[in-house]
Image (tube, coloured by chain):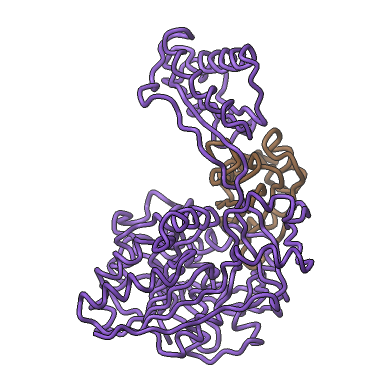
Chain colours: A brown, B purple
Amino acid sequence: MAKRKLIELAHARSGDKGDTANVGIIARKPEFYSILVKEVTADRVKEHFRGVCLGKVERFEIPNLSALNFLLHESLDGGGTLALKADPQGKTYSSALLRMEIDVD
Amino acid sequence: MIRIANGQGFWGDSLEAPVEQVRRGPIDYLTLDYLAEITMSILQKQRSRDPKAGYARDFVDMIARVLPDLVERRIRVIANAGGVNPAACRDAVLAVAKRQGIDVAVATVAGDDIMGKLDEFIGRGVALKNMETGEPLSSIRDRVQSANVYFGAFPVAEALGNGAQIVITGRVTDTGLALAPMIHEFGWKVDDWDRLSAGTIAGHTVECGAQCTGGNCQIDWESIPNMADIGYPIIEAEPDGTFVITKHAGTGGRVTVASVKEQLLYEMGDPREYITPDCVADFTTIQLEQCGPDRVRYTGIRGRPATPFYKVSVSYAAGFKAIGSLVYAWPDAYKKARAADRIIRDRLDRLGLTFDEIRTEFVGANATQGIPSAEPSSEVEPQLAEVLMRIGVRSNDRAAVDRFTKEIAPLALNGPPVVTGFGSGRPKVEEIVAYWPALIPKTEVAPEMTLWRNES
């Protein structure tokens, strides 16, 4: 078992819908997808974004794209124009998630 | 097969992209997305000052540059550039055509602006409840600045069927702009759910311009060729609902399975339920294949029936905010920036000012991502060359926000040392226009398609 940073296994893009950020991660190789499914759980993502994501985290599986989509509720300081954040649309949350360390056999 | 190009991902995107899409290779349709949620309220304000304003002027300038090419090569243009005043946008385009001595058919798709009908709707029990909070619109009725229904592709397809070369719409979905030519050319029906979903996913892929052709692309970003001349996307659509995403030969950027996957996930909710006025598309059915250099083929897409609702975008006044900043330099830049933040907050307390929110972020340390694991390590932190302290407040009390803007610059002389970045003066107080998403039964509103020609 070795620790790897998620950025070695996946790439990502994030966006916003009101106060909810979405972070999609895509396996760099199809064979990494099962590792993402096992390791990058909604609970782990919630913990990774503690202090940022104040609501729940939902996860959706998109096996045909070797991808997972996460919805991070209450994560954008009210969202859109209300937010005082430097990144009110969560554009940088994509690579923020890729900082996560996961266990790989 | 028809070629549908996107030349604009948002209002503020490259002015050259639509011109390049027209001139660098073959296309049949040029689609342009100018409207974001915030844009509608800005346009509504412009129209309230000038009845001939309230649309995307960049679009008219662009048409003036390329109209002879469009006519010569029979390229048809679809743009939601009409904003809250499609008729004025149409008049401006027809005036350009007249000056150039060109006869062109221009259609508008309107009826999306329901600002004048809100009280009637509320009176009849159409509550326009906030999709996120469930509150009825009546709770903010007196602060509403704009209200628009998102129409889909069918009224645009109708305009094409009536012979329009340029279709100017109000609030039509981004995906609908690209789907409309497929409906028109291939005769797709309102219940062709699989094909409508395929066209919708094609539209989603290209709606953000170069964001699917190597722009903002994380995978192998350093090796993406010639970004200065990045090619914008083109859909090569087939009657059976399959399509290829590509770009003009000789342009920069890159179209790969990986680059389009990133865009497919952008602003994604539940991947099985991508809801538009036209259908419910299922992203878990997409099959992608690299079928050549800078060519990705999409097959297998399935969808489900559209819902009985249109989405409504309401904008409303929601108080005031201001954001100011100062830059602190080595050594201990982060520590100084945090000290400055504490001092400002103490002074706001002494002044008796309260706000709905005060937020401070430290650019150069951990402003954007904000997560614990992005904080600089204890070895790195004292050595940071500089940190920008960015502090903002929000309140319904304009005077309090205004007073806050005068508490930043004094720290240049009366706070922690080695500070700069106050040169541009006091920050501005901004009026906040917030966004209220709602649903309305499709039976309550109808798109209005009108066709015009100039007389030159």
Residue B428 as seen in the image, left or right of residue B137: left
- Residue at horizontal 33%, vertical 70%? B92
Q: Position of residue B235 (x, y in %)?
A: 44, 76
| Residue B259 in view, yes or no | yes
Find the residue positioned furthest to the bottom: B187
* Above-or-below relation of B214 to B398: below
- Name which quarter of the figure residue B137 lies in: bottom right
- Total numbered labels: 0
- For the residue pair B429 and A84, the one nearer the viewer reads as B429
* Above-or-below relation of B392 to B352: below
- Residue at horizontal 72%, vertical 54%? A37
| Residue A22 in view, yes or no | no
Q: Position of residue A16 (x, y in %)?
A: 60, 51
- For the residue pair B21 and B114, the one nearer the viewer reads as B114
Residue B329 as seen in the image, left or right of residue B378: left
Quadrant of the frame with the N terminus of chain B: bottom left
* Above-or-below relation of B306 to B38: below
- Name which quarter of the figure residue B210 lies in: bottom left
Residue B118 as seen in the image, left or right of residue B29: right
Q: Position of residue B264 (x, y in %)?
A: 56, 63
Q: Position of residue B369 (x, y in %)?
A: 58, 37
Quadrant of the frame with the C terminus of chain B: bottom left
- Name which quarter of the figure residue B436 lies in: bottom right
